[in-house]
Amino acid sequence: MSPRGVAVPDVRRRLFAAAEQVLAREGPAALTSRAITGEANCAKGMLHAHFAGLDEFVAELVLDRFARTARQARELPRLAGRDTVAGNLVTVALALLTSAGPTVASLAVTRPAASLRIRQALEAGAPGFATIQGSIAEYLDAEQRLGRLVDGTDTPAVALALVGTVHHLLMTTPVDAPDARAQVERLVAVLVGP
């Protein structure tokens, strides 16, 4: 346990990781500030010292995971011409599924104040599904210019279909569902070919 008055490095990262561990092990009902700080092995008040409460913490956790995936998706256009189009799309789709995690995303939906905060942040420009969708469309445009994607492919529609499906899976698929990857691979094959 961190002694009182001693700085804890990377508090946000540590608390976010602890919350994900609690969620994975015990589910959303077990997520309390006490459970998170206990898992993080830090002072009980640490969460409230850095966040206005559990709703703000949950919102920031979800936004952090979206931002991480958006950063990864921004790299996607640089992959044009490498590996396979389908493989690159599956990789970014699975990153979105695992970065926010179905349990974390569904937790936010059950907490109205967290959900509102997330929506407001996304509307104000925080990276989320729209950012990821834009990066995917940009990547597909680059692949189309290289001749690796059929001319006339509606790249914004393909990006929307992929992100929309991942969002659906994120909100409806249990964390340990074995077929999420298979569903993403089948969808990508339908959208852009193998």
Image (spheres, rainbow, N blue to C red):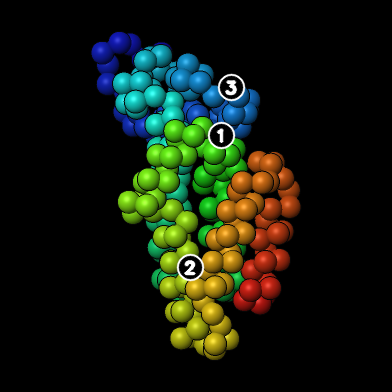
Helix, strand or loop status at disc 2:
helix
Structural distance between the alpha carbons of marks 3 and 2: 36 Å
Q: Is residue 142 left or right of residue 106?
A: left
Structural distance between the alpha carbons of marks 2 and 1: 29 Å
Q: Mark 3 is on which residue type?
A: Ala
Q: Is residue 186 above or below residue 194?
A: above
* Residue at image location 68% in from the left, 72% down from the top: 189
* Residue at image location 66% in from the left, 46% down from the top: 172
| Residue indicated by mark 3 | 30
Residue 136: assigned label: 2
> Is residue 160 in view?
yes
Q: Nearer the viewer, residue 192 or 53?
A: 53
Nearer to us of marks 2 and 1 is: 1
Q: How crowded is the residue under tag 3: few (<14 C-alpha within 10 Å), some, or many (20+)?
A: some
Nearer to us of marks 3 and 1 is: 1
Q: How far from the left and from the top, in percent, is residue 12?
A: 37, 32
Q: Nearer the viewer, residue 48 or 11?
A: 48
Q: Is residue 183 left or right of residue 107?
A: right
Q: How crowded is the residue under tag 2: few (<14 C-alpha within 10 Å), some, or many (20+)?
A: many
Instruction: Identify the image quadrant of residue 87.
Output: bottom right
Q: How crowded is the residue under tag 1: few (<14 C-alpha within 10 Å), some, or many (20+)?
A: few
Q: Mark 1 is on which residue type?
A: Thr
Q: Mark 2 is on which residue type?
A: Ile
Q: Is residue 189 left or right of residue 143?
A: right
User: For the image shown, how many numbered marks are present on the structure?
Assistant: 3
| Residue indicated by mark 1 | 110
Q: How far from the left and from the top, in percent, is residue 170?
A: 60, 48
> Is residue 61 in view?
no
